[in-house]
C-alpha cells in the first residue's frame, strides 16, 4: 500500500499490463497459437433460372389429318369414284350416250370409272356382267359394286346397303333406294377390279352388241 501511494502511476501501468496479458491468453489456443476469428459474412444469392423458350409451331401449315381408310388405296379410290358419280347427278337420260351431259345406264357406269382412271370396254349392261367376276357375299352391297336388274338390262353402282346410283329413263342420273321394286329385280352383282379390267375370254369371244336397244330396253322405271 505504501508503494501504491508512492508510485500511483506505476501501479496503474501494472494493472493495465495485467489486463492486456489476460486478454491475449483468452484469444490463444492451448498451444499458444493465436486463434483467427472470421467476422466476414457470406451472402448467398439464389440462382436465377433463365426462362425456357420453345420454338414456335405453325399449326396452320400442318397437313389435314386423314383417316386410315382414306390413306389406303381403296379408300382414296372410293373417294374419287364418289366425287365422279356426284358430278354427274342430275344429268338426263339418253340412250347410247356416255356424257358429259346425258347417259344411259351402262354409259353412266362406264363414264364414272373412266373419270377415276379405270378403263374397260364400253358396252351394254350384260357385257359388264360377262366381263367382271362376282364379289364375295359381304361385298355385294359395298360401295362401287355393280348391281344388275331385270334380266341384265339395267345396271347401277351400289352406294351402300340402302341404295345405288344409276341413270334411269325417268329421272336421269339419280340415287335410288333399294326398295321392294328394285330388290325384287336384282339379278346379281359384279366387282370392277382397281388395277386393270381386261375383258375375259368369254366376253372376247362374243360378238359385240350392235343393237344396244335390245340389250337395254328397260333402264329403270
Image (cartoon, rainbow, N blue to C red):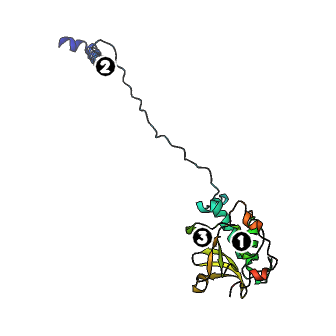
Identify the image quadrant of residue 109.
Answer: bottom right
Q: Closer to the N terminus: mark 3 or mark 2?
A: 2
Q: Which mark is residue 142?
A: 3
Question: Label 1 crowding class (10 Å Cα cut-off): few <14, some 14-19, many 20+?
Answer: many
- In the rendering, which numbered label is found on residue 187? none
- Can residue 129 be spotted in the picture? yes
Going 29% across and 12% down the picture, which residue do you hit? Answer: 31
Q: Is residue 12 above or below residue 41?
A: above
Q: Nearer the viewer, residue 59 or 163?
A: 163
Q: Secondary structure at mark 1?
A: helix
The answer to which image quadrant residue 209 occupies is bottom right
Disc 2 to disc 1, C-alpha distance: 117 Å
Q: Which quarter of the rendered picture does the C terminus lie within?
A: bottom right
Q: Which residue is identified by label 2?
A: 27
Where in the figure is residue 93, as x and y percent of width and height? 76, 84
The residue where tag 1 is placed is 128
Amino acid at each position: 500500500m505504501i508503494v501504491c501511494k508512492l508510485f500511483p502511476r506505476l501501479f496503474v501501468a501494472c494493472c493495465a499490463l495485467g489486463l492486456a496479458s489476460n486478454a491475449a491468453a483468452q484469444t490463444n489456443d492451448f498451444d499458444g497459437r493465436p486463434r483467427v476469428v472470421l467476422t466476414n459474412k457470406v451472402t448467398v444469392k439464389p440462382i436465377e433460372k433463365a426462362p425456357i423458350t420453345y420454338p414456335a409451331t405453325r399449326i396452320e401449315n400442318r397437313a389435314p389429318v386423314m383417316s386410315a381408310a382414306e390413306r389406303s388405296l381403296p379408300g382414296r379410290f372410293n373417294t374419287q369414284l364418289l366425287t365422279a358419280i356426284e358430278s354427274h347427278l342430275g344429268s338426263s337420260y339418253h340412250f347410247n350416250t356416255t356424257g358429259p351431259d346425258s347417259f344411259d345406264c351402262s354409259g353412266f357406269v362406264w363414264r364414272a370409272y373412266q373419270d377415276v382412271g379405270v378403263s374397260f370396254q364400253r358396252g351394254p349392261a350384260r357385257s359388264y356382267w360377262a366381263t367382271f367376276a362376282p364379289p364375295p357375299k359381304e361385298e355385294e352391297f359395298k360401295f362401287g359394286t355393280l348391281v344388275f336388274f331385270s334380266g341384265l338390262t339395267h345396271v347401277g353402282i351400289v352406294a351402300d346397303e340402302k341404295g345405288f346410283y344409276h341413270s334411269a329413263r325417268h329421272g336421269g342420273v339419280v340415287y335410288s333406294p333399294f326398295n321392294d321394286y328394285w330388290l325384287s329385280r336384282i339379278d346379281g352383282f359384279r366387282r370392277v377390279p382397281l388395277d386393270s379390267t381386261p375383258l375375259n375370254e368369254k366376253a372376247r369371244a362374243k360378238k359385240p352388241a350392235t343393237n344396244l336397244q335390245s340389250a337395254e330396253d328397260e333402264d329403270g322405271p
